[in-house]
Amino acid sequence: MITFEGVTKRYPGGTVALDDVSLECPTGRITVFVGTSGGGKTTALRTINRMVDPTSGRVLIDGQDVRERKPAELRRGIGYVIQHAGLFPHRTVQDNIATVPYLVGWNKKKARERALELLERVGLEPAMAKRYPFQLSGGQQQRVGVARALAADPPIMLMDEPFSAVDPVVRAELQDEFLRLQDELHKTIVFVTHDIDEAIKLGDRIAVFQTGGRLVQLDSPENLLARPANDFVAGFIGHDRGIRRLSFVPSSAVPLNERGVLPAGTPVSQAPPDGWVLVVDGDRRPLGWASADGLPSSGVLGDARLAPIGHTFDVETDSVRAALDAAILSPSGRAVSVDAGGRLVGVADQHDLSAAIARSAAGVEPEPPSPRPDGDAPAARPDGDAPSLSKEGG
Ligand SMILES: Nc1ncnc2c1ncn2[C@@H]1O[C@H](COP(=O)(O)OP(=O)(O)OP(=O)(O)O)[C@@H](O)[C@H]1O
């Protein structure tokens, strides 16, 4: 646990970069510092590894004031990743990653083996080990930067805008990879960004800083979206926070039905006279939507012209936002839920989605999910391909 106790930093010349900041960054979790430019995020981050010492107040790691530790020794237990990766240009990728292991006295062979292992962990080919940083793309350099910070297996990682210098596609990949790594490694991470979407995607807890180094809200991403502390935070989050909050509501809250679901072998004469029919195969895999008024006069549903299903959602892993998106893009206006094997679980109608959304907005807990053989509770996840976002609960 990293604890800020009334931390103030006043630079010579009078700038107040941090103004009486108190907060906790829980062990094994990602705490994101976000806010306006000049709000004190980087200063706050750097008080943890003593690149900056507070004017007053204390920063503690597991109860010990960091000022009782020598900076060099302290920093060996804290990985540090910055924008543009900050790699040493004249060292190979492998030697860059092995920097801290060399410093702490590992022998060369062990340090280089560790570097190769980490290269793979962050999704890079072993062949890149011998390259120099200038021979890598920006995204690859950032991955090497993350690998270097992880090399001595520090319990704490400080990351200052680590993904800001790459294009949005690479950035999303790096974020997903980062969440996957954290699922395995459970580091205590403090992550600085000026991008609220990145904060919401990555953070277990988000600290919002306002100009003048004031911490204005410390909350879970979900609460931040639902209940911004003031107009500044609401403005910073942006207008569509209602929709974005749905990323945190599990779609298990949405009732499913099987209305209008028929096997492909059903004679068209047995189809309902109006509306849409969801045609499924013998394994209950959805094949497509058939419009009742466009059906041929004879034959079976499987012979009819079917409109594509489009997006589906999985009640075990997807959010209400994903279900809503599936409904909006579905020709029938109904969202199709399938399991991991692609088999139909049920269909969500728009009024059921609206009811689930209204319940979540009112703060009503969703119905407990029906028990499943593996006993796991379903979890919402935010948009994109990031792994489970059920971070608050562990
Ligand atoms: N070494 C320094 N000397 C004097 N003032 C500084 C110093 N470092 C930072 N500041 C000032 O402290 C304030 C906070 O800076 P900091 O870099 O912590 O903000 P930030 O929230 O990380 O901003 P950004 O998002 O633009 O990186 C700013 O007004 C900045 O100009």
Image: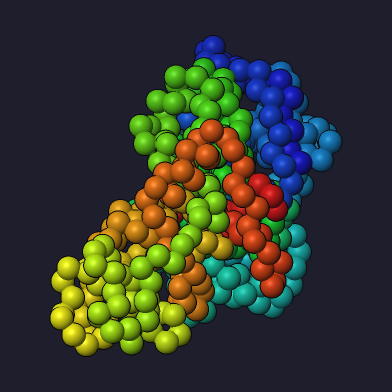
Q: Position of residue 270 (x, y in %)?
A: 30, 78
Q: Position of residue 247 (x, y in %)?
A: 48, 48
The furthest residue to the top: 14
Relative to 42, is 54 on the left or the right? right
Q: Position of residue 259 (x, y in %)?
A: 40, 65
Relative to 159, is 368 on the left or the right? right
Quadrant hosting residue 12: top right
> Compared to 45, does 320 lie above or below?
below
Q: Position of residue 308 (x, y in %)?
A: 26, 72
Q: Residue at x 54, y 67 (%)?
A: 122
Quadrant where the image shows the N terminus: top right
> Compared to 194, does 150 lie above or below?
below
Q: Residue at x 55, y 56 (%)?
A: 252
Q: How many marks?
A: 0
Relative to 208, is 186 on the left or the right? right
Coloured how?
rainbow
Residue nearest the viewer, comparing 235 with 45: 235
Q: Residue at x 53, y 40 (%)?
A: 360
Is residue 338 at least partly visible in the picture?
yes
Residue nearest the viewer, comparing 291 with 243: 291
Relative to 72, is 149 on the left or the right? left
> Compared to 242, does 296 lie above or below?
below
Is residue 302 at least partly visible in the picture?
no
Q: Residue at x 44, y 50 (%)?
A: 352
Quadrant hosting residue 133: bottom left
